[in-house]
Image (cartoon, rainbow, N blue to C red):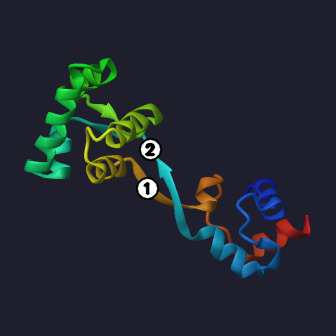
Amino acid sequence: MNYSALKTEISTDPLAIGYAKMTDDQVAASLNTSNRTAIASVMVNARTAMQTLGATKGAAFLDALENAAASTSPVKWAMYFLKSDSGVDVGDPQTRGQLDALAAAGVLNQADVTTIKALAETTISRAHELGLPVVMPWQVDHARGQ
């Protein structure tokens, strides 16, 4: 157990959880609750888009990208990879930003973009986010006492 990281989390409370007013049991429960979103690297190709969105929505999504590719170089290159087995990384911040921009511009359906981006999202605990194993109340007590 990395007590230094645990002590820092509890003492600085960077997310304003309110650890100071919690019991050791409550702090441990809070740290172990899976309520944080983590973004992972996930490669998506045209097949994945069709499977995820369904035939009709998937085709419309890909058609919209294909149309945008004619005037937008990043989309043109993304289409190159979407058509291959390798795909594009929907966990990459730039890819996610480009998808959001295309949805904001009305090129892509926002719900479809959200669904595709969700492929790279997973729910984790604050403890996991900090690189800690499951936190036990006695470990919180120990970290507070250091």
At horizontal 29% and vertical 54% (from top left) the residue drawn is 111
At horizontal 14% and vertical 35% (from top left) the residue drawn is 63
Which residue bears the numbered disc 1? 122
Which residue bears the numbered disc 2? 40
Residue 91 falls in image quadrant: top left
What amino acid is at disc 2?
Ala
- Answer yes or no: do the residues labelled 1 and 2 have beta carbons within 8 Å? yes
**SS type, badge 2:** loop
What amino acid is at disc 1?
Thr
Q: Which residue is at the far right?
A: 146
Q: Position of residue 122 (x, y in %)?
A: 43, 55
In the shown orientation, is residue 96 left or right of residue 85?
right
Q: Which residue is at the far front?
A: 105
Q: Residues within 10 Å of mark 1 (few under 14, many from 20)?
A: few
At horizontal 38% and vertical 47% (from top left) the residue drawn is 120
**Residue 85 visible in the displayed image:** no
**SS type, badge 1:** strand
- Number of numbered discs: 2
Q: Position of residue 58 (x, y in %)?
A: 15, 45
Q: How far apart are the two marked residues, 1 and 2, measured between alpha carbons? A: 8 Å
